[in-house]
Amino acid sequence: MINLDFSTLIDRAVKDVFAFVSNPNNMSKWNSAVVSIEQVTPGAVAVGTKFKTVGEAIGRRLEGELQVQTYEPESKCGFQLNAGPMQMNLTLALKTVGTGTKISLSVQGNPSGVFKLAEGVMTGQVKSLMEANLAKLKSVLESGA
């Protein structure tokens, strides 16, 4: 089991940060593991909305499904990803700090198959990936996305 927590401060209002991170259509703009994402459930993004995903992990291309699990405006959003032998839950919690936003990212993963065998290596890779992704998210949002 993979359990990791990260946080960063973003110099943007919480409403702007939430609008960006709660919409999975924006994931490929800041999450380097996401190659492409396409909404398959019609309508506005809400709990239960599903997306078809293509990603990469440990050098492997993974097709899967992402579903919105939590959607609390300007506070929290969460997603469950099922891709090949990997199930991951990502939760982003937001809090106003001064004129900016503290974003906390929690990642839980339950690898199986070949990923279970490489869980130790994978944990390190996920940690590095998520640290880099949060830095990119901060950069994208602070540059006006």
Image (cartoon, grey):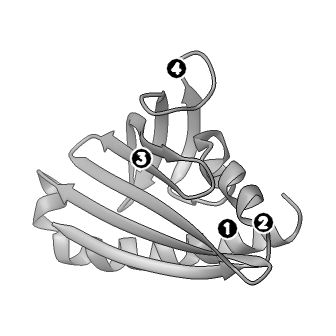
Disc 2 crowd, CA 10 A, few/some/many (<14, 14-19, 20+): some
Amino acid type, mark 4: Val
Q: Residue at x 52, y 80 (%)?
A: 7
Residue 25 in percent (x, y) is at 64, 39
Q: Secondary structure at mark 1?
A: helix
First-in-chain label (4 vs 3): 4
Q: Residue at x 30, y 40 (%)?
A: 82
Q: Residue at x 66, y 82 (%)?
A: 9
Outermost residue, top side: 42
Residue at the spot of label 1: 137
Residue 101 in percent (x, y) is at 68, 74
Q: CA distance from mark 1 to mark 2?
A: 6 Å
Residue 123 in percent (x, y) is at 28, 74
**Residues at marks 3 and 2 touching, judged by CB atoms closer than 8 Å:** no
First-in-chain label (1 vs 4): 4
Amino acid type, mark 1: Leu
Disc 3 crowd, CA 10 A, few/some/many (<14, 14-19, 20+): many
First-in-chain label (3 vs 1): 3
Examine the rendered structure and indicate whether residue 113 appears above or below residue 127. Answer: above
Q: CA distance from mark 1 to mark 4?
A: 24 Å
Disc 4 crowd, CA 10 A, few/some/many (<14, 14-19, 20+): few
Examine the rendered structure and indicate whether residue 76 appears above or below residue 35. Answer: below
**Residues at marks 3 and 1 touching, judged by CB atoms closer than 8 Å:** no
Residue at the spot of label 2: 141
Query: Is residue 100 or residue 124 the one in the foreground?
Result: 100
Outermost residue, right side: 144
First-in-chain label (4 vs 2): 4
Q: Secondary structure at mark 4?
A: loop
Residue at the spot of label 3: 79
The disc at residue 40 is: 4
Amino acid type, mark 3: Phe
